[in-house]
Amino acid sequence: MIGEILSTGDEVCLGTVIDSNAAYIALGLDEIGISVTRHSCVGDDMDELVSILSEIGRRADIAVVTGGLGPTVDDLSAEAAAKAVGGKVGLNPEAAASIEKYFARFDRKMSGSDIKQAMLPADATPVANTDGTAPGFILHVGGCRCYFLPGVPREMEKMFAKAVVPDILAYRGDETSVTLRRELSLFGLPEALVNEKLKGFESLFSGVKLGMLARFPVITVKMTAVGTDRKMLADELDKAGDWCAAQLGDKIFSMAGRSMEEEIAFLLKDAKSTIAVAESCTGGLIAHLLTNIAGSSEYFLFSAVTYANAAKKEVLGVAEQTLQTHGAVSEETVREMADGVRRVSNADWGLATSGIAGPTGGTAEKPVGTVCIGISTRDATFAKTFHSPFKERLSNKQIFAICALDALRKHLLKAKGK
Amino acid sequence: MIGEILSTGDEVCLGTVIDSNAAYIALGLDEIGISVTRHSCVGDDMDELVSILSEIGRRADIAVVTGGLGPTVDDLSAEAAAKAVGGKVGLNPEAAASIEKYFARFDRKMSGSDIKQAMLPADATPVANTDGTAPGFILHVGGCRCYFLPGVPREMEKMFAKAVVPDILAYRGDETSVTLRRELSLFGLPEALVNEKLKGFESLFSGVKLGMLARFPVITVKMTAVGTDRKMLADELDKAGDWCAAQLGDKIFSMAGRSMEEEIAFLLKDAKSTIAVAESCTGGLIAHLLTNIAGSSEYFLFSAVTYANAAKKEVLGVAEQTLQTHGAVSEETVREMADGVRRVSNADWGLATSGIAGPTGGTAEKPVGTVCIGISTRDATFAKTFHSPFKERLSNKQIFAICALDALRKHLLKAKGK
């Protein structure tokens, strides 16, 4: 089956908003075996909309269209869809009821402009929207089953997963099929090398669809299996996951598709341990990542972002002598930083970073991209130096932060094994 | 003139990479008065590429195509372009020379697969790439002047600004024209309301193109004027900028298009002042933003991310009594946090946050979205409470951080005025 994606709206077409919906939908369609051959985007322009919907109706079997379902005059999707099939819009009672139900939750009544959102093409089937006012709808345009969804990512994503995917499966006669997924998260390999290492996957696991999502500096390997026998699919995914793990080794930090900060949260909670961080070159990013997790106050106590050497001495008790002899970017300094922050906050674990994020500040001995990472426990202190190939400040801050958390993760696992 | 954008590559079409190039190019074309009517994306598939290039050749006057210029077998753009005009690719000596020159900088010689990147359609004009190996090229397909650029954003953006924009201006006979830009940054208004407040701009300043870029929670208003008289354009932009400033009031934090952290950097450096931060609910994000600026060690000394109350007491000297009586999220507590962090690091300014980012932890009195901000100088201490309408943790962290920096900015300006 051929799939297409259409994003609509002046803000996307003019570039004031980056279209992240298309990638989300493309991945989702790919997972259930629909090859997406084309994405398109047009503005809020009736002629353009009608013309591109007609083109898609000739080319594709399945299409997902986002945007243009709201109450304002710019929202043209329903009318354009009606025109593309030579029809008109009319009040859809089911859609009107769903809008009324949504408003009732907030003790509000539906007003004049809201009713526009219930005006759908005559043959359209409404799709409920539990997170916003505008319902979506399904309509055949030419030979293509088109799913019209809102442009708001949160609303769109829910409707795509809850309504579109099951409808596509039913449409192609897969009602009884189940979709199982597995995700591996890894850090420390470039995308091209991951591709290289996973060569041969397709022939070994022909029933499993392999995908990859790069969110710098982390890569998620996604495996999807569609079929009717849940047990068989799960076994196949287990085997495929184990094979990938063998190929990628300890670059994998989560077999459950967690982000690095989620994995650390999981391990710390599991061990009922607490952490404190002392950051120099990462400048607060480690604390920011850790506190992005709801409930992080359970294990995250404190981060000292000690940019100035005075703060390293005052707050963490790093010795003047250490800074003088070895410099701020040294294993000796991060050891004292990690020990210091653990002590001052009475945490179980101390994690420290000091490095050169760039673009300037590098030397021949310690070039831009150098980072020293210190880890302190109640029993011992460790330090190690890593090198990033990047010269750019923001990329390096991100790599340094994930690298430090990955080092901590390995120590947490070792402590757990004891 | 009608413009189109085509992104190519399996990774974009399959959704493993979000296409941010299209938005960048759309904004850039819009600035020089080219209306972009359509974006498209296809994978690394010869038939699809040839067919969409031919379509674009029939529809548009100007098109920017990204991706598919590299040395691997997946890189099909040059061959597809040749096919679309019924021609063939051949070695382009100018392109070959530019690749050799690029390699010479790294003491490398061009190898077999690299030469592929110099194989261009017969009538193509090469576009130099100073940041990568693959040159771009210009080719007329049907009635459309097509610019083929690499998909790597850094390379693409440079080539777009340095080669594509001037070529478009020359192509439409604007060789002597200059493009002047002005950007205003603002915080605290939703996009729809900014639109509303700037209604009437087009009729007042017909020579100035207005655009908007939303990067949550900051909005950048972009004004562009194209013409031949630099002085007249600058005057017109000044007037337009002043008019916008009057409409948007103190929501504007930079008349120079700076980010909030750049504006703070500018003000602190200008005043030769230093800052220390005490963060609770922002969890390190303020420190992260401040240290994203190269050279921030000049004014940023320390941030204490005191998630645990013990850390607030130990490191910042917040009184147990204050926490007991008023709670961690209170103006009383942020006052003591701001004073404490300024004192401990001997900074000129102390900035503190404590609030409820969510999704849980809110009460009737202090709902999710509440943030208290404290500011401390050597002479006085201030505190204020703000409310965000969001319930989502990451959005609130971002709003809280920008809100705190904006409050600091206003105090820095007041201190400067003295």
Image: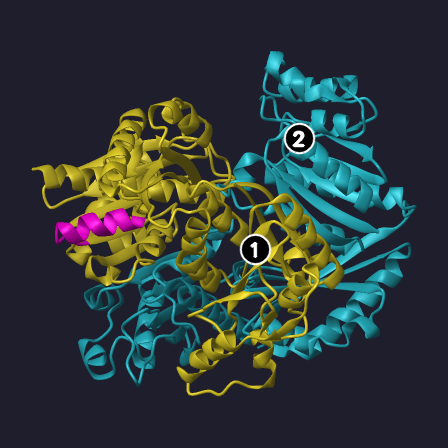
Chain colours: A yellow, B cyan
Letter of the chain that mark 2 sits on in the rendering: B
Q: Is residue B124 visible?
A: yes
Q: Position of residue A319 (x, y in %)?
A: 24, 45
**Residues at discs 1 and 2 both on one chain:** no
Q: From mark 1 to mark 2, how far is it between C-alphas?
A: 24 Å
Identify the mark at residue A184; answer none if there is no mark. none
Residue B47 numbered mark, or none:
2
* Above or below A185: residue B237: below
Q: Which residue is mark 1?
A: A146
Residue at screen point 31% across, 58% down? A291
Front one among A233 and B372: A233
Badge 2: residue crowd in 10 Å (few <14, some 14–19, many ≥20): few
Tag 1: Cα neighbours inside 10 Å, few (<14), some, or many (≥20)? Answer: many
Q: Nearer the viewer, residue B314 or B72?
A: B72
Q: Which residues are magenta?
A: A261-274
**Image coordinates for residue B26, horizontal then vertical, percent:** 69, 51
Q: Name the spot of residue B160 as percent of width and height, x first.
A: 72, 41
Tell whether A119 sits left or right of B50.
left
Q: Residue at x 66, y 16 (%)?
A: B115
Q: Is residue A90 above or below residue A187?
A: below
Residue type marked 1: Cys
